[in-house]
Image (cartoon, helix red, strand yellow):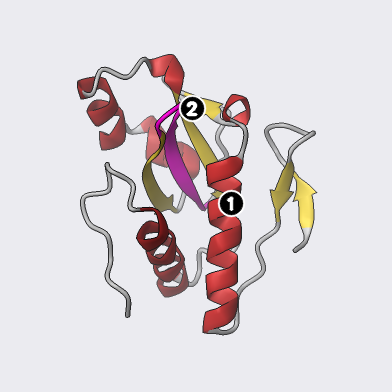
Amino acid sequence: MALGYNLFHADTPLVLIPMPSNDSELQAQARNILDAIAFTPFEYCQPLSREFSRLPARPGIYAIRHKTDGLLYIGKTKSLRGRFSGGHKAFLWAWLDKYNDEDVRIALQVIPYWGNPALLLELEAVILRATEPPYNAQIPTER
């Protein structure tokens, strides 16, 4: 697994994501991405804000995480900043569940190959099946 530097915290490694060429590489990559978004220390996750200016305007897979309850929602997007600056239903649900906004943050993994939407959809599906976050309304079935 290649490591790079995290754009948000220089002391936290960011996993560089090569394009998988077969199903076992896809499964391994999904596990690496899941590890990155699930086990990044909470204090290194991105806090909620109005503009989300610290999020990159790049494609990625992200998780809405609660400080003690863990993963709440997992998704993919063409632009991490754009996805959140327009609002997100997981924030409404967290508010309805009476979570303190300081206890909800965003963990993310930039993905360099957005040009292959089927691959990203499958990566997201593998991660969703492994975690079943409570705010994801639909968990894709195995293909």
For the point 55% across and 34% down, which residue is it? 55
Circle 2 Cα neighbour tier, 10 Å, few/some/many (<14 / 14–19 / ≥20): some
Q: Is residue 132 above or below residue 55?
A: below
Specify the quadrant that holds the N terminus: bottom right
Circle 1 Cα neighbour tier, 10 Å, few/some/many (<14 / 14–19 / ≥20): few
State the residue position of label 2.
Answer: 52
Q: Is residue 50 above or below residue 73?
A: above
For the point 28% across and 66% down, which residue is it? 140
Q: Earlier in the sequence, mark 1 or mark 2?
A: 1
Left or right position of 97 against 6:
left
Q: Which amino acid, by three-letter code, is at mark 2?
A: Phe
Q: Which residues are magenta?
A: 59-69
Q: Which amino acid, by three-letter code, is at mark 1?
A: Asp
Prevailing secondary structure of the magenta residues: strand
Tell me if I can see residue 88 in this picture.
no
SS assignment at label 1 = helix
Give residue 115's position: percent from left, percent from top.
50, 69
Left or right position of 34 against 135:
right
The answer to which quarter of the image holds residue 89 is: top left
State the residue position of label 1.
Answer: 35
Q: Count the labels in the image.
A: 2
Give residue 19's position: percent from left, percent from top.
62, 73
Left or right position of 134 against 118:
left
Please tell me whether residue 62 belongs to the stretch shown in magenta. yes
Specify the quadrant that holds the C terminus: bottom left
Give residue 34's position: percent from left, percent from top.
53, 54
Residue most extreme to the bottom = 22
Left or right position of 88 against 137:
right
Residue 19 or residue 123, whichever sits in front: 123
Q: CA distance from mark 1 to mark 2?
A: 23 Å
